Image (cartoon, grey):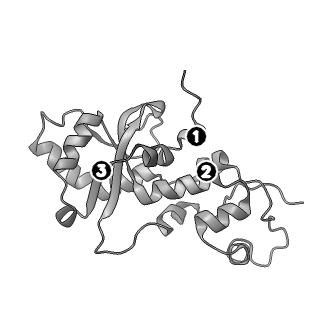
Amino acid sequence: MSEPRGGMSSVTRNECEAGMSTNEKSPRRLVYGPAEYAGYAGIIVDADAAARFGRAAEAATLGEYVAEFLGESWDDYVASEFGDVGDAPSPDDLFDFAEWLNEVIEFPTDTAWDVAAKRVAEVIASHGATLDEIRSGGGSPGGNMDAISGPLEQLAALATFIDAERDGFTLERDDALVDLGMSRSLYVSES
């Protein structure tokens, strides 16, 4: 009987990137919203990566994770991850989202930061008083991810300075995608 692996694999680092938009002409969609449960008044996440995290959070079995998150057939997954090794897991093994999340290296906040950090710094520099509480960099409460965060009203103001054609990304409010990208389901219920 195989041990529940929680989807750990050698490609964990690139899994989130694999499903994101790769069309060079399409701007990346970034969204912001509240995440007080994670220590942020507001935060920006990559919409595609957040949606993928949501699919991973819903997976109950390793087979569901492979099909919905990785978009692979079970046979292809086993061949790429385990080759001829006879101790491959079963698609019915439980998928542990929290365990998987501990192995993830790139979060939806990191992806958003990679896309927008330079432009955000330019906008903050030219509109300092309006955007003086926005933080960009390794400022997550756990210190393990890059993030662009700040008060919601300042993130809304920041969004007005973004031009998709010039900047290569859009920025709009979407609380539900932020919750998926920040893995809200893993936080203790708010009182």
* x and y, in percent, of residue 102 in the image: 60, 47
Between the residue at mark 1 and the residue at mark 3, the CA separation in whole angstroms equals: 22 Å
Left or right side of 18 for 152 = left
Residue depicted at x 15% and y 48%: 123
SS at circle 2 = helix
Residue 94 falls left or right of residue 125: right
Closer to us: mark 3 or mark 2?
3
In the image, residue 73 above or below residue 137 = below
Q: Quadrant of residue 131?
A: top left
Residue at point 69% right, 71% down? 81
Q: Which mark is residue 185?
A: 1
Disc 3 to disc 2: CB gap under 8 Å: no
> Mark 2 belongs to which amino acid?
Ala
Which residue was labeled with disc 2?
A: 57
- How far apart in space, not on screen, are marks 2 and 1 (Cα)? 8 Å
Asked where in the image residue 128 lies, by quadrant, the reply is top left
The residue at which mark 3 appears reads as 172
Q: Which label's residue is closer to the chain start, 3 or 2?
A: 2
What amino acid does circle 3 point to? Answer: Glu
Q: Secondary structure at mark 3?
A: strand
Residue 191 x/y as whole percent: 55, 20
- Give the x, y percent position of residue 110: 41, 52
Vertical arrangement, residue 12 with respect to residue 38, above or below:
below
- Asked if 187 appears above or below 32 in the picture, the reply is above
Q: Image quadrant for the N terminus? A: bottom right
